[in-house]
Image (spheres, rainbow, N blue to C red):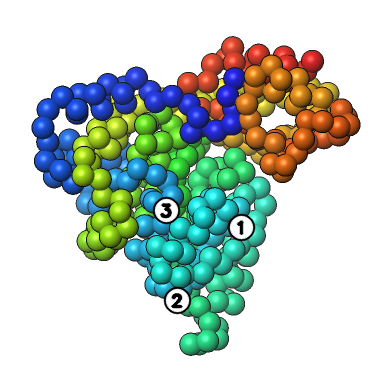
Amino acid sequence: MNFASDNAGPAAPEIIEAVAKANQSYHMPYGNDAITKVAIEKIREIFEAPAASVHFVATGTAANALALASMANPWDGVFMHRTAHAEEDECGAPEFFTGGAKMVLVDGENGKMDAGSLVAAIETTGDKGVHGVQRGPVSLTNVTEIGSVYSQPELMALCGIARHYGLQTHLDGARLSNAAAATGLSLAELTWKAGIDAVSFGGTKNGCMGVEAIIFFNPPRSNELELRRKRGGHLLSKGRLLSAQMAAYATDNLWLRLAQNANSRAAQLIEGLRTIQGASIEGTPEANMVFASLPRAAHRRAMEAGAQYYLFPFSASLEGDDDKHIRCRFVCDWACTEEAVSQLLDLLKG
């Protein structure tokens, strides 16, 4: 019963099989192999972007930081929601890889950037001439860190604002597959067709061993990204082991099928939480991540029986008033089963 993170789940059998197959013979290093070429073409295919530049790295932090470093100058501000992963969970990697760009935080309910707040942030950035940071790219997150999902019109509105000010747009798509499964939209509709210039497309959280794709829909950015990836220590010599994962992930809609199961289990969990006395669900969870508040006694029962998930704040204790409500996060991964969700709900109900 592990609901701590979709990173905690196993790799899908198709991914393991692809890596094992890639390991059976010799291949040229640093992405100069046939498997990488196949993976790049498959990514272009599922994004309906035959001219896109595609680069593989092993972590989501590297994908976000390297993409933003290729889009922002050291003296720029990068506009993102204040709960964005790049702001809260990447240990200053975007600032480091950009050479010092400032993260300009934008408000918005339910983890989504508010259009008016974005305009206000842009208008008050770069207004001091040489004395202040300049306007840089806008970075969105879909699925958001709160579990909500941007619709295409919402993305188009925010990208339109960025374009109005001559700014590029980046999308943190660590859970983009879950967003596509939730909306029924294609990857193209959630990215370049909505105005996104670059995306960090996640595989690790959705059944891969460890691979993310940095995709630029503006190919001239490709060379700079390649240089930054090498200089930053993220060009793997045995790159085929990353490419093999992504090639399998992009074959026969595996990326979508895995995300659909994760989302379905989260929907089951949400339905069950609504029947538990004293439980409340935050916001409007739409994919595979649920924030909720439950009595301490319910958390104690579940965790003492082996359930794993995060309490907030992290310092929250299971000792104390049984009726005190404690906030938590549940995440369902691709391998989560109906039985596991039912078992968790039974424990929480008591």
Q: Please tell me whether residue 122 is drawn above or below residue 327 in the rendered image.
A: below
Mark 1 Cα-neighbour bin, 10 Å: few <14, some 14–19, many ≥20:
some
Where is residue 324 drawn, in percent x and y?
Answer: 86, 34
Which image quadrant is residue 242 in? top left
Using the image, tell me which numbered label, if any, was put on residue 75: 2
Where is residue 157 drawn, in percent x and y?
Answer: 52, 58
Q: Which residue is mark 3?
A: 64
* Chain-order first, disc 3 or disc 1: 3
- The one nearer the camera, 232 or 82, is 232
- Residue 158 showing in the rendered view: no
* Chain-order first, disc 2 or disc 3: 3
Who's the residue at 75% across and 39% down the image?
316
Mark 2 Cα-neighbour bin, 10 Å: few <14, some 14–19, many ≥20:
some
Who's the residue at 41% across and 69% down the image?
99
Who's the residue at 48% across and 33% down the image?
7
Residue kind at label 3, given as amino acid type = Asn
